Amino acid sequence: MMSKTDPTPLAYIRFFHALPIKYGIDIYIDNKLRFNDVLYQDFSEYIALPPGQHTVHLSRTKNPIVLCTKVLNISDQKIYTSTIAPKSREGTGIDIYKIEDVLRTIPSNNFLIRFGHSGGSSAALDVFLSDDIPLFKRVSYSEITNYTPKNPGIYTLQLKESKTGKVLVSAPNIRLKPSRFYSIYALGNGSKEFPHIIAIPLDGNSYLKL
């Protein structure tokens, strides 16, 4: 039996559309439409869910055909980002990758940052922040690193192919503030329509309360 001091069972989840397609996606959870017309590169808001198994299915906006169905196991007192991305690094298929936005203590006057590789048709990647020493090395497709602390400031972020050193993305003037959790996501397949780009959202563990 739950005592008066026990927290109410609760978790939070959002979705990130990293699938290189031109149409929006509707996201259903347990057969209920929760997010409508989520576009490529966009993040949904976080919503609260009770812990347990939840069936998520995706469909093209205004089209009833199901693109992907997946059962997500949601744990109590957790925060998640679920990335909608190709099932393989070659860009085929569709999958939903559940990523925990881990709650931990941020060191004083630091922020915490991690990297997720959601860019199909690209090799393992290194991530650089304003210096020649990689912050993250040899991150393969669909992998997510742990958070690592950095001092706040204005950075130039680069993504490079680990094997060749080829620069895929160079993004200057990125301001990263203290006492926050950030993720860097690589997306795109290197084509003219969907070039390699990055997204740097503020993660929900920065502000959501459990």
Image: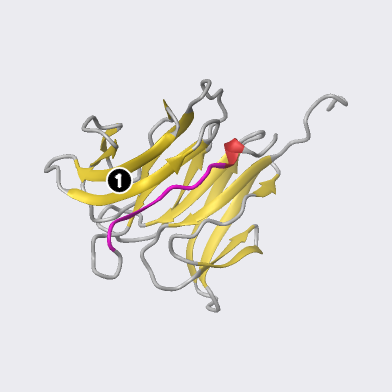
Q: Is residue 24 above or below residue 196?
A: below
- 34 shown above or below 53: below
Q: Quadrant of the N terminus?
A: top right
Location of residue 138 in the rendering, given as x and y in whole percent from the top left corner: 24, 36
Image-quadrant location for residue 163: top left
- Identify the residue at image location x=65%, y=57%: 30
What residue do we see at 53% from left, 32% from top?
A: 102
Q: Residue furthest left?
A: 164
Q: Which residues are magenta?
A: 195-203
Residue occupying image coordinates x 29% and y 55%: 120
Q: Is residue 87 above or below residue 116?
A: below
Quarter where residue 5 is shown: top right
Give the amino acid at mark 1: Tyr
Could you tell me residue 28's position as x and y percent?
A: 60, 62
Q: Position of residue 83 (x, y in %)?
A: 46, 51
Residue designated by label 1 = 141
Q: Is residue 40 visible?
A: yes
Q: Is residue 70 magenta?
A: no
53 left or right of 8? left
User: Which residue does the image show at 48% across and 26% down from the upper left?
Assistant: 110
Quarter of the image where one finds residue 139: top left
Vertically, is 137 above or below 57?
above
For the C terminus, give its image quadrant.
Answer: top right
Dominant SS in magenta: loop
Q: Position of residue 19 (x, y in %)?
A: 39, 61
Q: Nearer the viewer, residue 24 or 57?
A: 24
